[in-house]
Image (cartoon, rainbow, N blue to C red):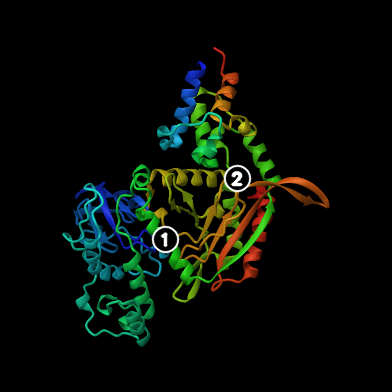
Amino acid sequence: MPSLGADMESGTLIEWLVKPGDRVHRGDIVAVVETDKGAIEIEIFEDAIVTELLVMPDTEVAVGTPLARLDAVGEPVQVRPDVAKEPAVVAPERPSKAMPQSVAEPLRTAAEPLRTAAEPLRPAAEPLRPAQSPSNVTRRKISPAARKHAREYGVDLDLVVGTGDGGVVTVVDVEQFAHTTQARPAARTPAPPAEMAARGGAETSPMRRAIATAMSRSKREIPHYYLAHTIDLEPTLVWLERRNAQIPIERRVVHGALLLKAVARAAAENRTLNGYWRDGTFEGRENVDVGVVVSLRGGGLAAPVLRTVAALDIDAAMAALKDATERARRGRLKSSELSGATITVSSLGDTGVESIYPIIHQPQVAIVGFGAVVTRPWVVGGGLHVRRVVTVTLAADHRASDGHDGARFLSAIERLLAKPEAL
Amino acid sequence: MNEDQLRHAVLQALYSIAPEAEDERIDPQTSLRDQLDIDSMDYLNFLVALKNAIGVEIPEADYAQVATLDDCVRYLTARMPQT
């Protein structure tokens, strides 16, 4: 079971699209998994032959649990749809962290009433199989600070996996454990909007809880700083409208694609905003892979990743944005699209609201927000004009960069947008 | 295509991007985008669906003239290919 986001602890296998004996190729969709983020298509990262399916449909398993056996080079090797290869995915979590969860799970779910007959909860009947059994850890080393924290949080230290040197249980381990056991939702089919409404919205959907968990953690751990800048978008929009008027409707480009490209190019210039904060250090990234926040009809959001956006031309960027938005709204994103963003963009679209101050998606270090394009009086070359403007905001991690870096980044976005033909 | 058929075609194009709208009453004189919370990407998809259904391509400059369901039908009626 791949980790499809830093906050994911388990997933429910919904459907196998392969069977033993099938030959699979890198990039093939092999299974569908239900998570807090909806149904996700799981891709394979190896050319291989499927020899055995280890997890049957409708089974919830912890992240890190092998789903199938593949035969790659003549002898059976255990492979899980590999996301660990992509550094961004698993974030600070380690697969072994699923272990305490599996112990805590039956206790918690037993107390939760079943919601509908169609959604059986089954962790009690089918214990999750941890990648590493607790008995592997014989002598527990626990830092004094971690013991103090465990007392404060009421955490049973026997359930916490140590990730410090030589398996030492650290403060961070205790905090993460306390945090995930309290806040982590079980993967369930999100209730349809009508059903939610009928219940008066009283029950929190799994996606809502996943957002709550990720955002609370980000706000708690990341020292955000914020910058805002209003950009005259009139020349850019005039250029785009002229371009759109000359081509068939199917090839029209929305201004959001230009904003996306400008962010990617600016992030490529300002490396302190593109990458990850992990284990106390900043890891910059060469490629700019932009997570795009897509609001879903009926509530919630998804943030599919568009790869190497700086290298795409405008038509390709538009096509990628259109495709990801549509599939996010249909609830069919691929596993590889849900992780690995190096920076994120969140737009308010055409709501008429001018600015958004977003929260960083860990382990990234920056998120860029665009408000709606609004018409305002604007001074251009000493004269007063009526112009369409957009406010761009930046929330960045002060551990990785300073306000000066952020200001240069926003200025770069403005400069790039002023020359849309060169984007 | 008469006005009723046009209205039906517009609604079908809308449902293709906002399926939940099928269960709602659409006010023919209120902005479709406001009513159904349609962003620019979905709006473009709606216009492409319209073009495929009835063969009229609405230029970006005319977006303001097709804001509501009634506007849309009126606009399209005037521009239907004559048969």
Give the amino acid type for the residue marked by disc 1 in the picture: Ala
The kind of secondary structure element at disc 2 is helix
Give the amino acid type for the residue marked by disc 2 in the picture: His
Label located before the other in sequence (1 or 2): 1
In the picture of the structure, the residue carrying the numbered disc 1 is: A212
Residue furthest toward the right?
A382
Q: Nearer the viewer, mark 1 or mark 2?
A: 1
Instruction: Mark 2: give few (<14), some (14-19) or many (20+) Cα within 10 Å.
Output: some
**Looking at the image, is A66 positioned above or below residue A277?**
above
* Residue A318 in view of the camera: yes
* Residue A246 in view of the camera: no
User: Where in the figure is residue B43, as x and y percent of width and height?
Assistant: 53, 37
The kind of secondary structure element at disc 1 is helix
The chain to which mark 2 is attached is A
User: In this image, B48 relative to A8: left or right?
Assistant: right
Q: Looking at the rendered structure, which numbered label has been put on residue A255?
A: 2
User: In this image, B79 relative to A189: left or right?
Assistant: right
Residue displayed at 35% across by 55% down: A206
Question: Where's the N terminus of chain A, which quadrant?
Answer: bottom left
Total count of labels: 2
User: Where in the figure is residue A322, as x and y percent of width and height?
Assistant: 49, 43
Residue displayed at 29% across by 70% down: A96
Front residue of A338/B33: it is B33
User: Where in the figure is residue A394, as x and y percent of width and height?
Assistant: 59, 61
Q: CA distance from mark 1 to mark 2?
A: 30 Å
